[in-house]
Image (cartoon, coloured by chain):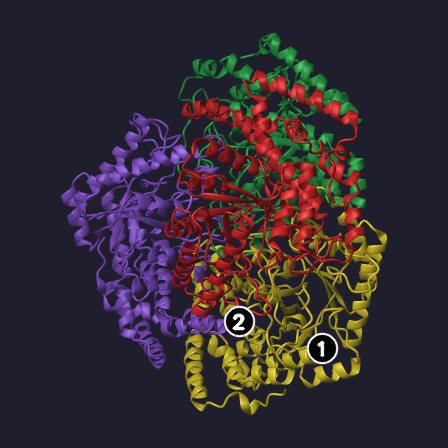
Chain colours: A yellow, B purple, C red, D green
Amino acid sequence: MILNPDQLNTNKDDISIHKDQFDNLASSLSRQNIQVDQIVNKLANFQIAIPSWALGAGGTRFGRFSYHGEPSSLEQKLEDIGVIHSLTKSAGAVSLHIPWDIPKDYNAIKELANSLDIKFDAVNSNTFQDQPNAKESYKFGSLSNTSQAVRDQAIAHNKEVINIGEKLGSKSITVWLADGSSFPGQSNFQTALSHTQNSLKDIYKSLPNDWKLFIEYKPYEPYFYSTVIQDWGTSFMLANECGEKAFTLVDLGHHLPNTNIEQIVSTLMLKGKLGGFHFNDSKYGDDDITVGSIKPYALFLIFNELVYGMENNPQNPELSWMIDASHNLKDPLEDLIQSLETIQITYAKALLVDQTKLKQAQENHDVSLCQEILQNAYLTDVRPLVKQARLQQQGALDPLKAYRLLSIREQLIKERGKNTVATGL
Amino acid sequence: MILNPDQLNTNKDDISIHKDQFDNLASSLSRQNIQVDQIVNKLANFQIAIPSWALGAGGTRFGRFSYHGEPSSLEQKLEDIGVIHSLTKSAGAVSLHIPWDIPKDYNAIKELANSLDIKFDAVNSNTFQDQPNAKESYKFGSLSNTSQAVRDQAIAHNKEVINIGEKLGSKSITVWLADGSSFPGQSNFQTALSHTQNSLKDIYKSLPNDWKLFIEYKPYEPYFYSTVIQDWGTSFMLANECGEKAFTLVDLGHHLPNTNIEQIVSTLMLKGKLGGFHFNDSKYGDDDITVGSIKPYALFLIFNELVYGMENNPQNPELSWMIDASHNLKDPLEDLIQSLETIQITYAKALLVDQTKLKQAQENHDVSLCQEILQNAYLTDVRPLVKQARLQQQGALDPLKAYRLLSIREQLIKERGKNTVATGL
Amino acid sequence: MILNPDQLNTNKDDISIHKDQFDNLASSLSRQNIQVDQIVNKLANFQIAIPSWALGAGGTRFGRFSYHGEPSSLEQKLEDIGVIHSLTKSAGAVSLHIPWDIPKDYNAIKELANSLDIKFDAVNSNTFQDQPNAKESYKFGSLSNTSQAVRDQAIAHNKEVINIGEKLGSKSITVWLADGSSFPGQSNFQTALSHTQNSLKDIYKSLPNDWKLFIEYKPYEPYFYSTVIQDWGTSFMLANECGEKAFTLVDLGHHLPNTNIEQIVSTLMLKGKLGGFHFNDSKYGDDDITVGSIKPYALFLIFNELVYGMENNPQNPELSWMIDASHNLKDPLEDLIQSLETIQITYAKALLVDQTKLKQAQENHDVSLCQEILQNAYLTDVRPLVKQARLQQQGALDPLKAYRLLSIREQLIKERGKNTVATGL
Amino acid sequence: MILNPDQLNTNKDDISIHKDQFDNLASSLSRQNIQVDQIVNKLANFQIAIPSWALGAGGTRFGRFSYHGEPSSLEQKLEDIGVIHSLTKSAGAVSLHIPWDIPKDYNAIKELANSLDIKFDAVNSNTFQDQPNAKESYKFGSLSNTSQAVRDQAIAHNKEVINIGEKLGSKSITVWLADGSSFPGQSNFQTALSHTQNSLKDIYKSLPNDWKLFIEYKPYEPYFYSTVIQDWGTSFMLANECGEKAFTLVDLGHHLPNTNIEQIVSTLMLKGKLGGFHFNDSKYGDDDITVGSIKPYALFLIFNELVYGMENNPQNPELSWMIDASHNLKDPLEDLIQSLETIQITYAKALLVDQTKLKQAQENHDVSLCQEILQNAYLTDVRPLVKQARLQQQGALDPLKAYRLLSIREQLIKERGKNTVATGL
């Protein structure tokens, strides 16, 4: 299903109301010496990858309620992303998961992606599940396993993922190592860590020169006592040991309660070691719910550090952005549209922070003023900026409204049926 | 120091910019069928009590950095609140702490308060510290102590607090019972709870007919293993056992990590047992920092329940509102001004939620739309509404700016000196 | 597979070493005026129900690694429990889950259970998953759903579960209501709570006179923003509104971080409203791992309250005990054996606490001594008492050792094959 | 007050009961091929430093209940430690806090310490409080402050602390940097971290060749939004940048909820970067309560890693051990005696773990057996081993009992009076 730009914004009143609101906001921001057009351009250029596993319904250990019209092939997944990208103009990339999404015909897939203006972002390996004909089981770990044979299988899989990525034009691989233990004593921490180091170094050796290796961290789940790469400190240490093409990847849901994530982001950028970002939100654990649905101000504080780092840390490479959420209750496409909207809104707010005034207030220890500066940016209703950025690129003024107006889900169900199941979790 | 309304808004440009912004917002809200003037009136009528202990610098167990020009008498505390109220028009009440603030001349104090348009909200008892000439020590508890003599002293103190409150025109007493234990085994939970029940019932017997008894809860601190009234469930149970004039009081900082506070608020209002609210914010424990400085969206969700409850729960009485924060790093008056601003802003956003549409979306299980409705209200920049409400009452357009422009702190230091210390923590 | 008591303890040396260790401990305890034989009898009488879903491998949302020789019918589940009970003499009950375990032939099942000395403990309903031919979906809740039709279906299911339980001789039903929401605004808290109250009252009306209704609580999962029955306070309130046959059930894993669970247990017993207990352990969330594998001292403190309550709270009925764990990495039968061992050990330690001395020390505020008294009991190696209780009843001295020596898992695999899958999660 | 060994164990029966219990345990352990005498020797050699600030009553921000007979000079503090060491034979070191404990006469202090068999462990600097005549304030940070003058003062103070330590024979300095911020925006994370790096490097340059620099970390308190050295990763990074004499110091209370501390310990020892350890316990935050009073099994798991590391990680230096607790409710000396007892007990249990069998079970992925091995050690009542180690060195069989029997606190009150106040928090 290809969306025609003409279909997206059919209501003239909406456009005219937007123009008024944008003009009001622009003049108000101009009074604060903010270059509105630069911000709109930055928003227009900001692209977030959609993971191929986020297009179907996710589940919990207690069950799964599937969604109608789910994509059942890689082609259909790309088409879904194409729909989102047409509407939002901010989803111009896909992040593939192997082995769920191995292309059968590389050229065809690349052409399809190209026609939809979608790039191939980081590829993801999977060593947390056993594959049907695998010789070794990952039940007790993969890259960290005490068994050489299991480690070798996991290393080989990661190298294969790199190969697949190369054929598609990806430039990075993300390793989420689920390995860990559920009981004290089950695993020797030092042995597991050493094996992991060596396995990652081995994978790193196969990394093409223009690639990056992203190492995720997570404190728990699917194991419930320990995780080999439990925190940013461990990931950072491993990345340093691998070399200069290895980086830490931050997933917002992978932290203990009350962690100051924005400070982690800031430290990693100062050290030139932040590679990428997985967006989602959570109240309790790795809940993987819609970006910004629970803690939007925390997201703003993180973006404030990201904006600062992108301005001030040339030692850090360009970041990979991805949404990594699980859609149990909503239409996955609607959820992704809401997530993209929130990311754009939050980025826009962070761009409004007056960094010069803030620095001055910090040096004066004028704590009240520091807070005023941040909150002034946060409280501003920036939706007109985000809409303007979309309109500039012929996207939809209001993507969710357009998605519903165009009855896209209904068409997908008609095409695909009610009982398709997307590969994934 | 009495502030003259004429001093507050001297910049004509600011006023005219505000008028524009208010008009723009008002017309945008009118398109959504929102009665803007009703909202402005609700904001104007919303008054939050300032606790008498929040006007000086607070400390931590690691030390205290005092602030210059602190009030050193009850009269000076009232004057400080008078300043804040003149600026914000939303701090028209004081909550006294006994024994820190026992008036020497009741009539004089009442006259002073009256002249400043300040009412006497809930009075607070203190049984977590020993007083100089007290016979019994609260080291091992007060209302819950195994010793009858200690309990009697604590009960008598609470009754005295009620007496003091009656003379001033207060209509409620807040009991924060710090009692608890720091080590397993130190205390028998059932004995401590039973003693507490009986002590509260005894205090309740002395409660005037038109008074309310507010029972706070808190999971830990100053004791580190258990607290007699550890959660809302315990407070609710105790309030039910006391009678219909007893209520639960929610302090935002008194919860375990990740607690869904808004749901607690909702349940208590449904049962007609929410008595009052202590505002502050926190990232880790009972951090007592500025309202909305960490989790403004959580505050919005709480206000959403409060607004719903005030509309739909006639079984619940009018609520007592109080700021309960500790000001370690900022000028306490600036901190209070910021807190009041945030409360007004958040209340305004909650008033924008379209309850009819929300109910409809909930019944349709249209989860994406439910989220849109809440976030549409939250993302709106409502500051013009709050400013308008203040202007209507001859308050300051921008209270913090006016406070600084008028050099109020400098004048307080000139009057009071650098080394005054306010009673409190 | 029926185990013959003669098979269980074939090593004479082990028995003789045990006798020595038991005698040493008994004489040491006698010096402390402890009635050793009474404790051994209490241990012998303590029976814990095994849930029918705990006999196969559990999984996480990231996958499941199945275990060989899993039971594929209710009969085989009972046989597995029979094996555990033969070895431990402490698993003399089963807790069935409906619809996973609806008997086809009630008489045959009752006879089988009887022959294995297994009683039917609480029956469990399931309204968190959709059943193949169900008319209504529980995706957006069951007893709390805004739709009358869904609520009716869920109520009818609970009534059917009671009917099934009656035919088997159960005397209680456990309702774990998973209902909740994953996004702010998705659900109206007051509506959901009111519907739940009414639904529970309706179920309660069908409760036989000699039955009990257990109401679980849980703060999150499978929903990630709110849960209708989020804490003990809500469960307690609902149980009070249902009537005197309704009680709160505590599952150890269903609490926010740092919750003082032992105090909850104590309060509920004081109020006569603790109905039952689900044992497991966790470090992060509802991890459902082996009892006592992470926080054995917390378990001891809980048992200390349970022992105190069983001695001092005649207002509270006899408790239902159940293990509720998920076995992802271990042989489920081994895991259950370890869980039962830990429960018995912890109960034994709690029975050693000198309640008279403790009460005295508490009244003297002798905090150091209070701690000494608890820790003296906890530090005692009570394994000889637990072994003695098993030997008295012809169980195995060391159940796990016997289980392995007898190659029970190998036999189960031979009988059942490698690829059976138990119903459950 | 000097305790005579003859006074300590006057009850012959106690000795004879101990001998029996020790023999029974020794023969049981010998059957498991454990070298009992080696373990007893290890216990005898294990010495833990007492911080000079732990000998008086601590407080909370809500107040302080002082204890009678507190030491009011450094000499009296050493005498208190001398009492504890005479009784326990495990407190043969003191850790001084500057400026609270600057000696007036170095030789006299050294002689006194020597006569009491007390060594000078790490010295501690203080840049979290302002000193009476200090030129600069640490209200907004010390080593991380934006002001060069403040940083210089803090650096100079640390260098002075090293000088004082050198005169006493200390070989290490512990830097607990409280610096942080209480509000988003108050501090620029990157600037604060860079300043801290440079300040630490400057201090490091003044470090004598045979000294070590210990860098603590802590997530929050006394600041409530961010801490410059928030976690082990930051401390480890800073230590690496300082050089090979810089190490991370772990304080048990300085972690977010649910942190797997034992894994951190393990990683640091593998990397040769664990310098020291501060013992205490907590349920909620940095509660600083008696070691092992809340989570004794977590302490065991940590000791299991420490024992493993001391055996297998020659790359890591000998560790500095210190108790760092705050005594609000108990006699501080009793609390320290209980803490030392728990540390010794836990160390003994960890020494019982059969590392060879454990390694084998880990390689076989025999998770149940791994758990059995750890729990077998943990469940063993090792108190006879600890007593034996004390008796060998002429300490008290039961230190707390002896302390009370000898009426030591009463004597201290007689000597010092009721209203002395120890320097400290």
Q: Is residue B200 visible?
A: yes
Q: Chain under label 2?
A: C
Disc 1 and disc 2: Cα gap in Å?
Answer: 33 Å
Question: x and y percent of residue C174 in the render?
Answer: 51, 51
Instruction: Name which residue type carries label 2.
Output: Lys
Question: x and y percent of residue C128 in the render?
Answer: 54, 61
Instruction: Name which residue type carries label 1.
Output: Leu
Quarter that holds the C terminus of chain A: bottom right
Give the numbered dot on residue A220: none
Quarter that holds the N terminus of chain A: bottom right
- Left or right relative to C205: residue C181: right
Q: Nearer the viewer, residue A33 or A413?
A: A413
- Left or right relative to A104: residue D58: left
- Left or right relative to B179: residue C403: right
The residue lying furthest to the front in this view is: C107
Q: Is residue D384 above or below residue A240?
A: above
- Residue at label 1? A74
- Left or right relative to D329: residue C279: right
Q: Is residue C104 above or below residue B42?
A: above
Tell me if mark 2 has few (under 14), some (14-19) or many (20+) residues whose alpha carbon lies within 10 angstroms of its own: few
Question: x and y percent of residue D142 in the render?
Answer: 53, 45
- Label 2, secondary structure: give it: loop
- Residue at label 2? C135
Tell me if mark 1 has few (under 14), some (14-19) or many (20+) residues whose alpha carbon lies within 10 angstroms of its own: many
Question: x and y percent of residue B396 in the render?
Answer: 28, 64
Splitting the image into 4 quarters, where does residue A122 fall?
bottom right
Q: Nearer the viewer, residue D403 or C234?
A: C234
